Amino acid sequence: MVFSSEPVVRLDKACVFQGITAILQDVSFDIDKDEFVFLIGRTGSGKSSLLKTLYADLPLKMGYGKIVGYDLQKIKTKEVPFLRRKLGIVFQDFQLFTDRTVAENLYFVMRATGWKDKSKMKTRMVEVLMRVGLGGAATKMPHQLSGGEQQRVVIARALLNHPSILLADEPTGNLDPEVADGIFKLFQEINKQGTAVLMATHNHDLLNKYPYRILKCEKGKLLDSKTSEIVT
């Protein structure tokens, strides 16, 4: 007997709204638990709005959406923090507390997501920093790190709660090409260890170099390279 696992993300005829404006319509796609998927499109085409809908920062008003077991139309406000514990969210602009050390930035997220045991918190903090290649950075302030190192801290932060999927919004957008390539390879390693990745990007070098599936926001629709010929 063959058992099929449920996709980590499923949208079916979903509409993505900003306020009362529909940005994307009739959006349907699945992402499996070990997939790596690029999300592309022009500025303003709906990439960030789609990601915000997936982590429940924007409500799903029409259609069906489910991510890591949560129904996005039915999710209650009090459930959103529990949803986000099962996601890893990586922003382009880091969003680190500049007046706190790297360790304090990570501890803040752990406390906010229900961690209590200080020993376990320290162990996990060390684990994720080692995983992103920053084992010696715990006591440093963000301004003491390069842009690439700060993005690695953000990725470490996203990994704290063992997420099923990473949602990354232009994670290499502010980095030079060599540093960006290193960050991308880190996402690849994380993906190979079983975490799905949905990465919004404008980086055509990555798209040309790595033949992953592509979702493209264009003219209010979402095209999927699994079923469409996509010109990047």
Image (cartoon, helix red, strand yellow):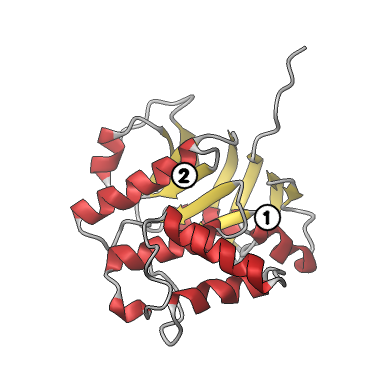
Quarter of the image with the C terminus is top left
Instruction: Give whichever of 111, 219 is nearer the camera.
Output: 111
Instruction: Give whichever of 76, 172 is nearer the camera.
Output: 172
Residue displayed at 34% across by 44% down: 185
Residue displayed at 37% across by 81% down: 141
Quadrant of residue 4 within the rendered picture: top right
Q: Relative to 38, is 118 on the left or the right?
A: right
Q: Which label is found at residue 82?
A: none
Q: Relative to 126, is 204 on the left or the right?
A: left
Q: Is residue 33 above or below residue 51?
A: above
Q: Secondary structure at mark 2?
A: helix
Quarter of the image with the N terminus is top right
Can you see residue 74? yes
Instruction: Give whichever of 206, 137 is nearer the camera.
Output: 137
Q: Residue 178: horizontal and vertical position, in percent?
A: 19, 52
Q: Which label is found at residue 60?
A: 1
Q: Is residue 82 above or below residue 137?
A: above
Q: Residue 182: horizontal and vertical position, in percent?
A: 28, 50
> Label 1 is placed on what type of residue?
Leu
Eye-nearest disc, 1 or 2: 2
Q: Residue 134: horizontal and vertical position, in percent?
A: 37, 62
Residue displayed at 72% across by 72% down: 116
Label 2: few (<14), some or many (≥20) within 10 Å? Answer: many
Q: Work out how far the residue at label 1 is from the one at label 2, CA to CA, in angstroms.
A: 28 Å
Q: Which label is found at residue 190?
A: 2
Compare marks 1 and 2 and give the one earlier in the sequence: 1
